[in-house]
Image (cartoon, rainbow, N blue to C red):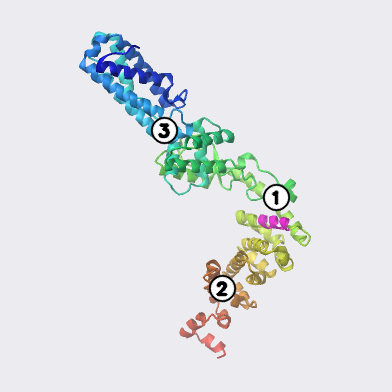
Amino acid sequence: MTSHGGAAGAALDSITRSLTEICSGDVGGGGEYRWEPPRRFTDFARRLEAVVHRLARAPELLSSPAVRTALGGLAADLDAARTTLSSYRSRSPIYVLIHCVPLSDALRGRATSIAAWLALLDAPFATLPDLKKRAADLSRDMDQPDLKVTETEERVYASLQREAAEAPQSSKAVQSATVMDLARALGIDPADHEKLQEQIKLLRADLSGLSSMAERRILISLEKMFKDWSKEPCIADGLVAANFEEEAHIPPFKNFLCPLTKEVMKDPVVLESSQTYERAAIRHWFDRCVEDGRDPTCPVTGQVLQSLELRSNIGLAGAIEEWVNRNVEVQIKSALKYLGEASSCPLQCIEMVLDNVYRISEEHPSCRYRVRNAGIVALVVKLLNDQSSRMGSELRGKALMALQSIVKDSESKIIMLEQGTIRVAIRSLTGWSEIEKEYALKILLEFSGDVNCCTKIALEKGALVLLASMVGNPDYPTLSNLAEEVLKNLEEVEDNVQHLAMAGRFQPLITRLCNDCPRLIISWNF
C-alpha cells in the first residue's frame, strides 16, 4: 500500500504495518500462533485489514475529523496489540500458559477499544454502504470478543501462579492433577514423559536470560513435579519382595493404582466421571479446586463435576485386598525362611526381610496378626540376641523398628513378653546408636501403656536406672522425652514407686508420702 501524507496518512501507514505483521505471522518471528485467543484476534485483524484497504482507496474520507480521530486510536491500539503478541510469540507453550490470563485480558481490552474506534466511522462511511457494513459488523463482533482462555488453561494458570507465590508445597495428589491438566492444555498425553520433559526444557531455555523470581519458582516447581510424575509407579505398595523372592511376588493390575498417587489404592472411590481414585488423594484435589475458587474436576478426564459424591468401589477394594493378602503370605514365608537361617544369610537379605515385616505391620494392620502368629517375633528377638555384634547398629535399629511396629495390641504384647522382647529392648538402651535407642524406647512405651507390663519393666535389671539416666539429656531431646513418658507410665503402678526411688527418681515417692499413703509408708523400710 502506498504511503499517505498528513496525520491521517501516517496513522493509516502505522495501522497497515501493524496489521501486516499481525496477519502475516511476523510478530516475534515465532511462526504460526500456538494459542487460540491470538488466532481469533488475528481473524479480527484480517477483517480490519480489508476495511483499511478499502478506506485507503477513498482518500476523500481522510479529511474527516472523525476518521482522523479513529485512525489515531486504531494505530495506537494495534501497535499495542502487536507488542503484546510479540511478548509471547516466540515463547514456549508453558511460558504462554504462565501468562495466558493477562495476555488474554490485554488482547480482549484492545479488541473492545478497536471496536469503539470503528464505531466512530459509522457516519463518515455513510456514502460507502459496503464499507460501512463491514466496519459496523467488525465493531459489533470485537465489542464482545471470544478471547477467553479455556477452563483447562485457567486451571493450569491458577495452579502455576500458586507455585509462583511460594505457597506451601502441594500434596502429591495435587501435583499429579496439575501435571495432567498441564499436559491436557499442551495437547500431550500425560503418560508421554518425553514430550512433557521437552516442553519443560523449552521453558528453561525461555527463562535462561532475564526472568522474574516468580517465573523461576514455577520452573523449579514444574521440574520437581515432572520428576515425581515420571517415576515408575509404586506397584507393590510397600510389599516389594526381596531379590531372592522376586519371582514369587504377584504384580498388581494397572487399575489397582491411583492415577494421582501412582500407588496401590487402599480406599478406592468412583466419581461421576466413572474414574477411580484413592479417597484421600481425590479429596486433596477437590480441596485445591475450592481454594482456587473453581469447580472441581476429574483430573484424568478434565470433566467439571456436578456432584462430589465419592462412591466406594467395593469390587476393586476386594480385589486389592485379596492381592495384598496373597503377597503378605509370600513375604511372611520369605521372612520365616531367611530369619531362620540368619547366621548364614547375607545381611542385605536380612535387612530387606525386616523392611518388609515393618511395612506389612504398618501399612496393613489387618495383616499384623499373621506376622505375630507366624513366629516372626521369636525369630527377630533371637536375631537380636544371637547376631547382635554381626548386625551393626543400623540393622539392629531396623530389627527393633520391626518389633515396635508389631507391638500395637494386647495379643501381640503377650506373645512378645513370652519371647523376652522387654529384656531385648532394655539391653538396646546401652547401645551407641541413637536410632537403636529410640526404637527400644518406643517398644517400652507401648508396653508401659499396659499396667501388667509396667511391673515387668520395673523389675527388669537395670531398666529404671537406664531410663532415669536418659531423662533431661539436652543432647538427645527425643530420647529424653520418650524415657520420661515411659517413666510416667511406670509411676502409675504403686508397686513401682519404691523401685523408682531406688533408681534415683524420688518425686513419685515424695508425692505419695505427702498424700499420706498408709500402704506405702508401712511397706517402706526407713
Amino acid at dot 1 = Ala
Residue 87 is labelled as: none
Residue appearing at x 70%, y 50% in the figure: 241
Which residue, given by chain and number where applicable, does mark 2 sit on? Answer: 470
Quadrant of the snapshot with the N terminus = top left
Q: Judge by depth and name the residue closer to the eye, 73 or 170.
A: 73
Q: Main secondary structure of the magenta part?
A: helix
Q: Amino acid at mark 3?
A: Cys
Q: Where residue 295 sits in the image (x, y, percent)?
A: 42, 38
Q: Position of residue 216 (x, y in %)?
A: 46, 42
Identity of the residue drawn at 59% across and 46% down:
265
Residue 269 visible? The answer is no
Magenta stretch containing residue 354, yes or no?
Answer: yes
> Judging from the image, what secondary structure is the residue with disc 2 in?
helix
- Dividing the image into 4 quarters, which one contains the C terminus? bottom right
Confirm whether the magenta stretch covers residue 340.
Answer: no
Residue 211 x %, y %: 43, 39
**Which residue corresponds to mark 1?**
241
Q: CA distance from mark 1 to mark 3?
A: 47 Å
379 shown above or below 102? below
Question: Based on the displayed image, in which of its 4 quarters is residue 469 positioned?
Answer: bottom right
Task: Please name whichever residue, 133 or 420, is drawn nearer the observer in this view of the structure.
Answer: 133
Which label's residue is closer to the chain start, 1 or 2? Answer: 1
Q: Which residue is mark 3?
A: 100
Vertical side of 392 occupied by 525: above or below: below
| In the image, residue 119 above or below residue 277 | above
Q: Is residue 113 visible?
A: yes
Q: Residues within 10 Å of mark 2 (few under 14, many from 20)?
A: some
- Mark 1 lies on a secondary structure that is loop
Specify start and end residues of the magenta stretch as a single range.
347-356
| In-image side of 29 versus 378 (left or right) | left
